[in-house]
Image (spheres, rainbow, N blue to C red):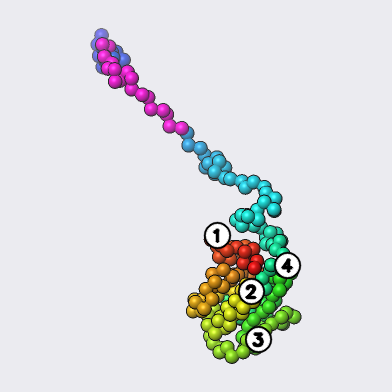
Amino acid sequence: MAINARKSSGRDGPNPFVNRKITRNQRNATKRPAPKARPSRSHRSASLRTYPQKRSRRSITSSPFHHTRAAITDLDIPLDSRRPVLIDGENVAYNDISSEYVANRMYQAYQWFAANGYRALILCPDYLLAKLSGQTPHMPIELITDIPDGRGNHATNVEFELTLLQRAADEQAAIVSERSFASSYHSHIDVVQNRVIGFTFFRESIFIPVDPYGRAGPWLREILRK
């Protein structure tokens, strides 16, 4: 009877670990800890999510980062310390989407400040009235004469800008405008750097930011206070 020879496996062969010496370095070698399991995406996002603590309105007055829309309308400034507000009618009325001058946009800007207890006045070149579309609600408008009409005046109008800045300096007033005043700021640098309030329109509603100049300030509360 033939017998098929079976190849010896490691299990049947000599033990390779017999008489093997272990050196001190191998014996004292520090074992590397096993890597921790990586949390799932949902767990990671949940663990990184922070939730702001609730604070009272009075506790946030010194930190404008936490101002809310309600805090804007409650500026808590004494009446005799509030600045008058000059609204750049030509810039505010212009709608970038329709390329039209809309009278209601000026009214919305005026109404926002008037409703919050501020004396507001709209300044605009006298030629603007002929360009306004829609009905003109009742609001205080002062027309400035001798301002040349030109294309793109809603963005840059040096003659009108100089008049606007001079009035703000004389009356210690703030200005509502999105102009850069790039060609006229040198005449009243302090006004341009500290007293211009930007705005945003959504449909027919105006929004006034609490940080017109960004995080570096000044903040809306500081601008509107003498």
| Of the image marks 2 and 1, the number of the one nearer the N terminus | 2
| Magenta residues (range) | 18-36
Q: To which residue does mark 4 refer?
A: 79
User: Residue at point 33% right, 19% down?
Assistant: 28
| Of the image marks 4 and 3, the number of the one nearer the N terminus | 4
The quarter of the image holding the N terminus is top left
Q: Residue 217, position in %: x, y?
A: 56, 62
Q: Are marks 3 and 2 in contact (CB under 8 Å)?
A: no
Measure the alpha-carbon separation of dots 3 and 2.
18 Å
What is the chief secondary structure element of the magenta stretch?
A: loop
Q: Which amino acid, by three-letter code, is at mark 2?
A: Ala
On residue 173, the disc is: 2
| Of the image marks 3 and 1, the number of the one nearer the N terminus | 3
Q: Residues within 10 Å of mark 3 (few under 14, many from 20)?
A: some
As drawn, the residue found furthest toward the top would be: 1
Q: To which residue does mark 1 refer?
A: 215
